[in-house]
Amino acid sequence: MPLHRHEPRKSADALGIRPQYALIAEVAEVPRFRLGADPLPRDVAYQIVHDELLLDGNARLNLATFVTTWMEPEGERLMAECASKNLIDKDEYPRTAELERRCVSMLADLWHASAAEGATGCSTTGSSEACMLGGLALKWRWRQRREEAGLSSARPNLVMGANAQVCWEKFCRYWDVEPRLVPVGPEPDTTHLTAEGAAAHCDENTIGVVAVLGSTFDGAYEPVAEIAAALDRLEDDHGIDVPIHVDAASGGFIAPFLDPDLVWDFRLPRVASVNASGHKYGLVYPGIGWLVWRDPSALPADLVFSVDYLGGHMPTFALNFSRPGSQIAAQYYNFLRLGFEGYRLVQQTCRDTARWLAAEIGSLGPFELLSSGEGIPAFAFRVRAGTGYTVFDVSDHVRREGWTIPAYRMPPALDDVAVLRVVVRNGFSRDLGRDLVDDLRRVVERLPSAPGATPEPPHGGFRH
């Protein structure tokens, strides 16, 4: 979560909110950064918060985010009905726990886990928590192997592409693991981890390799099968056994339906675990993620806690504890409602729209495509040299039309390339796409004569 600072008190006028509504008694000052002395009427409190939120962007027009911004009313209703159920209390809410168990089983089957191996898994608050838990399992397994062999376990490392989602760098910092970021590039068409790069950065202290199925930079799939083959050769030649965790935050709900012949999951013996975001292309509002291990041995028993104070024996592996059962109910609803063919149709529509939109934007003239929606339904494009403006100018000006399109620099070794990225999600129609293209056309027509340049954000990158 973002960090916020306490705002020291200033003048009363600077701190107060002044809701101006019809009833005289309701025209009063409400403290902004401290509790008021007295309660407010509920409708007034609602209206104050409602009006504050009017200044947020429109989620449906936010083409930066991968998370779901539209659901069917029935799914929303189930979420509201389950908002007060604490998912962790599985003794009190056994049917919600059962739905979670069924979802894990469905995903294990979707990702080709062997029935004989007994895949195990859990839900999480999102893919970031799932990645943390997957990384912890890799570290514990590596440490156990080292200690059983009488070797030091003092310097673990994790290999990933420099394009990996920032949660993996967080994992390494929080749990004292060296992040080995494999450079991408130097060509713009090599934007992700390669098999050769992964194997070259591994040694006896490597706890695992993270392969990303759907890069947040440009939507590309990393070649999981090729990475697995390179690690097989590494083990044959040097005796170094390195497992793979597949970060399929987006691709885990795309590839099984649109790319069934792509081998990336538990069909590869070297893949130990897979995570995905239910709140991305799983089509549920935030926040829910999923994590599945190919067999119980991939999840060390020392990481699993047995809790009984809520009324029944419950094994748990999580970073947080209490959370609502809403997203579980919505995920199970989607699985029942859509089935395999329904998910295929939704994801195919998103990919078709992304391909069409990429082609339309590429034909405008000032833009050059770096990807075109062939992996997950997202694509990146840049401004051609000599236009007189930058991707940051385009992002700023198109925001004035209501759209949010992120502008950022690519990973190290490609960080001289700045791009814009569009994510197509369920609910983003061709009609909205046409409106976006028309607005982009107007933006690039007026930008050459627009005064000044939009400064690049100080962080220099975007990895949502």
Image (spheres, rainbow, N blue to C red):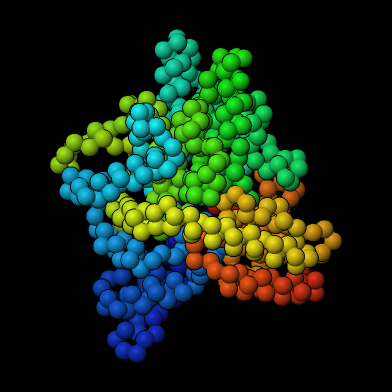
Q: Nearer the viewer, residue 51 or 319?
A: 319
- Depicted 103 relative to depicted 390: above or below: above
Q: Nearer the viewer, residue 121 or 263?
A: 263
Residue at 22% in and 37% down:
314
Q: Residue at coordinates 46% horizontally, 74% vertically from top-left?
A: 54
Q: Position of residue 141 (x, y in %)?
A: 42, 23
Residue found at x 33% / y 36%? 317
**Residue at (35%, 81%) from the top-left corner?**
28
Q: Nearer the viewer, residue 404 or 273?
A: 273
Horizontally, is 69 left or right of 359 in the view? Answer: left
Q: Is residue 82 above or below residue 100?
A: below
User: Relative to residue 314, is residue 118 drawn left or right?
Assistant: right
Quick check: 420 above or below 125? below
Would residue 367 be found to the left or right of residue 372 on screen?
right
Q: Dividing the picture into quarters, in which one does residue 360 lie?
A: bottom right
* Whole-percent x, y for residue 150 in the image: 45, 9
Residues 406 and 278: in front is 278
In this rendering, position of residue 372 left or right of residue 284: right
Rendering quarter of residue 422: bottom right
Residue 58 in view of the camera: yes
Q: Position of residue 415 (x, y in %)?
A: 71, 46
The image shows residue 224 at horizontal and vertical percentages of: 57, 35
Q: How many marks?
A: 0
